[in-house]
Amino acid sequence: METGQMSTTHEQHGARAVVVAIDGPSGSGKSSVSRRVAERLGLAYLDTGAMYRAATWWALHRGVSLTDGDAVADLVRDMPLVMGVDPREPGVHVDGHDVGEAIRETAISSAVSAVATNLEVRAELGRRQRAEIAAQAASSSFSGGRGIVAEGRDITTVIAPDADVRLLLIASEEARLARRAREVHGSADAAAVEATRDQVVRRDADDSTVSQFLVAADGVVTVDSSELDLEQTVQAVLDVVARTADLHA
Ligand SMILES: Nc1ncnc2c1ncn2[C@@H]1O[C@H](COP(=O)(O)OP(=O)(O)O)[C@@H](O)[C@H]1O
Ligand SMILES: Nc1ccn([C@H]2C[C@H](O)[C@@H](COP(=O)(O)OP(=O)(O)O)O2)c(=O)n1
């Protein structure tokens, strides 16, 4: 297997697992950039936002009211969630359901902050995220021990504050709204941007009550993608990784 071959080389060099932590607001490009960075470096990829989205889907699927915080937390503690960590195909399954597409629907985007601001849910999903990050140090893992790119809102600050590379990906509100409008509505005209505002601006305001992702914490490098296209942003992040971590990549 390709990954296995990379891991053998990696281990022969005696290199240890690298953890790249990336946070940022909605539409800054975290998911698309992190996936590409992970793929190019032969690392695993963890989309922690997808875990909050999957928890929201699961609660709605099971008919649990999102306003009943204790019931949601109880449900999430036992959630049979399987997160794929292959950056080429990062599948999300809950209780055998492939929810990769369903969790991106507007109904979930609008509701997810109610789950993401539940501190008991954060504790449970944070525990699973730390376990996955630690697991990628093992040679038997997807990355063959090379490591992982994990992205979300609190990875640089709470989940992996001692990551080798800590990065805040930002972009202007205008750029983020236009990107999301193009993605969801296929256009960045005024109507499409307005229709996207709730799931970008309101959601970031709600989410920032429990995580600090609008300003870089100490030691976190900021990359502003407002004026960069996707490939330029990937390159800017790879440059930060190369400067910061001894990847031998
Ligand atoms: N630097 C960029 N320039 C232009 N479009 C981008 C850039 N980064 C991401 N995109 C596009 O913007 C949309 C939102 O990106 P995404 O990775 O989902 O952001 P996030 O995970 O931060 O919410 C996607 O359609 C993506 O392809
Ligand atoms: N580590 C994380 C990751 C995501 N979240 C929350 C914040 C968001 O509202 C949801 C979904 O995150 P996601 O990264 O998929 O959202 P965007 O694609 O950036 O719009 O989860 C969080 O609170 N902590």
Image (tube, grey):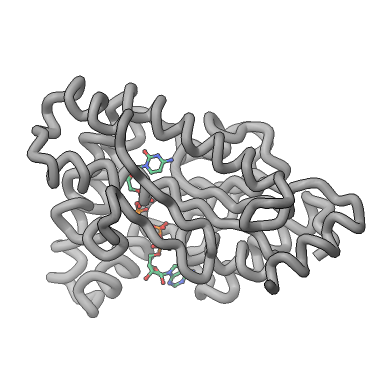
Residue drawn at x 67%, y 39% as measured from the top left: 163
Q: Is residue 131 above or below residue 26?
A: above
Residue drawn at x 32%, y 37% as measured from the top left: 207
Q: In x, y percent, where is residue 111?
A: 17, 44
In-image side of 164 versus 23 (left or right): right
Residue drawn at x 51%, y 75% as measured from the top left: 229
Q: In x, y percent, where is residue 160?
A: 60, 35
Looking at the rendered image, the quarter that the C terminus falls into is bottom right
Q: Is residue 199 above or below residue 114?
A: below
Q: In x, y percent, where is residue 23?
A: 50, 46
In-image side of 44 versus 245 (left or right): left
Q: In x, y percent, where is residue 187?
A: 23, 79
Q: Nearer the viewer, residue 32 or 182?
A: 32
Instruction: Give the image quarter of residue 59.
Output: top left
Q: Is residue 211 above or below residue 201?
A: above
Q: Nearer the viewer, residue 45 or 155?
A: 45
Q: Nearer the viewer, residue 223 or 107?
A: 107
Residue drawn at x 26%, y 57% as measured from the top left: 97
Looking at the rendered image, the quarter that the N terminus falls into is bottom right
Label tally:
0
Q: Which quadrant of the figure shows ligand 1?
A: bottom left
